[in-house]
């Protein structure tokens, strides 16, 4: 599943390719991805020019002249840039024909992705965006903003970090890596955490996300062939998916448990449960 660093990589790769290009036509092959009627979608977007691409959490925001297309890739969504309509595969569900005769296509094997359209400037009136908390990699985000919500909760920290209304941008992989770095057991409850621990978790999360963005950005050279791949960060994982492997810090075996229904990887020595 693409998480914040992968979506950021998509943003960085797509931006120079489509900015300044006008949409001259749209083909909608599978319309459940689009949250308004096909006619309205086309009417509003055709003749609009891509002005910028921004991102909030895992949402891509394609800013056009008058509207913003808010896209969530969910499990498998990807964008491709095609030179010819003949290159389309059966998993490309929305096709934007651009003024330079290229095709921006939305590819989604699982069809879980969504596209919403709003007037430019109204993005945060959308239900999907307005419920999101501050972004993990926002330089303005300080622990004081998330600590009160964590402190009053009896849910495990793993679940709290996945809760996008408290802070947005961390998915399953990066929460595991963050808690390893912060040396916090994923089952530790919100109210059991000190301010210093939350401070350390936030610092670790920012570090993990930044490193993942840096690696995603440097790996993907050919947009078309590798978009949607995790980049090189999978080589930097300390715990996630590494059950049975030796911890890079203490050599103890990495274990897998379930927390809030999610597969969770940790080092039982570095992330002691005794402190719960
Ligand atoms: Zn360890």
Image (spheres, rainbow, N blue to C red):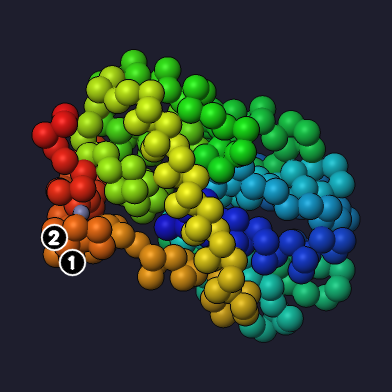
Q: Residue at x 49, y 59 (%)?
A: 212
Q: Are marks 1 and 2 in contact (CB under 8 Å)?
A: yes
- Is disc 2 placed on a helix, strand or loop? loop
Q: Residue at x 56, y 62 (%)?
A: 214
The disc placed on residue 253 is: 2
Q: Position of residue 239 (x, y in %)?
A: 27, 57
Quadrant of the displayed image that contains ligand 1: bottom left
- Mark 1 sits on what residue? 245
Q: Position of residue 154 (x, y in %)?
A: 25, 21
- Is disc 1 placed on a helix, strand or loop? loop
The disc placed on residue 1 is: none
Q: Residue at x 31, y 60 (%)?
A: 238
* Other residues around mark 2 within 10 Å, as few (<14) / some (14–19) / many (≥20): some
Given residues 216 and 207, the one toward you in this image is: 207
Q: Residue furthest front?
A: 250
Does 161 appear above or below 115? above
């Amino acid at each position: 599943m693409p998480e914040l660093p992968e979506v950021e990589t998509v943003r960085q790769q797509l931006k120079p390719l489509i900015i300044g290009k006008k949409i001259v036509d749209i083909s909608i092959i599978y319309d459940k991805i689009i949250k308004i009627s096909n006619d309205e979608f086309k009417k509003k977007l055709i003749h609009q020019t891509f002005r910028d691409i921004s991102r909030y959490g895992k949402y891509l925001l394609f800013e056009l002249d008058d509207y913003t297309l808010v896209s969530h890739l969910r499990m498998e969504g990807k964008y491709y840039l095609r030179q010819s309509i003949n290159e389309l595969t059966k998993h490309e569900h929305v096709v934007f024909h651009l003024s330079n005769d290229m095709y921006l296509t939305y590819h989604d094997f699982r069809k879980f992705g969504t596209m919403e359209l709003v007037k430019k400037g109204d993005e945060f009136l959308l239900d999907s965006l307005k419920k999101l908390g501050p972004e993990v990699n926002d330089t303005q985000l300080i622990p004081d903003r998330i600590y009160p919500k964590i402190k009053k909760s009896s849910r495990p920290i793993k679940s709290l970090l996945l809760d996008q209304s408290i802070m947005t941008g961390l998915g399953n992989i990066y929460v595991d890596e963050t808690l390893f770095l912060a040396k916090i057991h994923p089952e530790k409850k919100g109210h059991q955490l000190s301010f210093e621990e939350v401070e350390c978790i936030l610092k670790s999360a920012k570090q993990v996300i930044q490193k993942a963005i840096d690696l995603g950005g440097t790996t993907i050279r050919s947009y078309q062939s590798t978009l949607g791949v995790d980049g090189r960060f999978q080589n930097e994982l300390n715990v996630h998916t590494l059950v049975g492997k030796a911890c890079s810090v203490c050599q103890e075996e990495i274990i897998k448990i379930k927390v809030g229904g999610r597969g969770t990887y940790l080092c039982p020595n570095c992330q002691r449960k005794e402190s719960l």
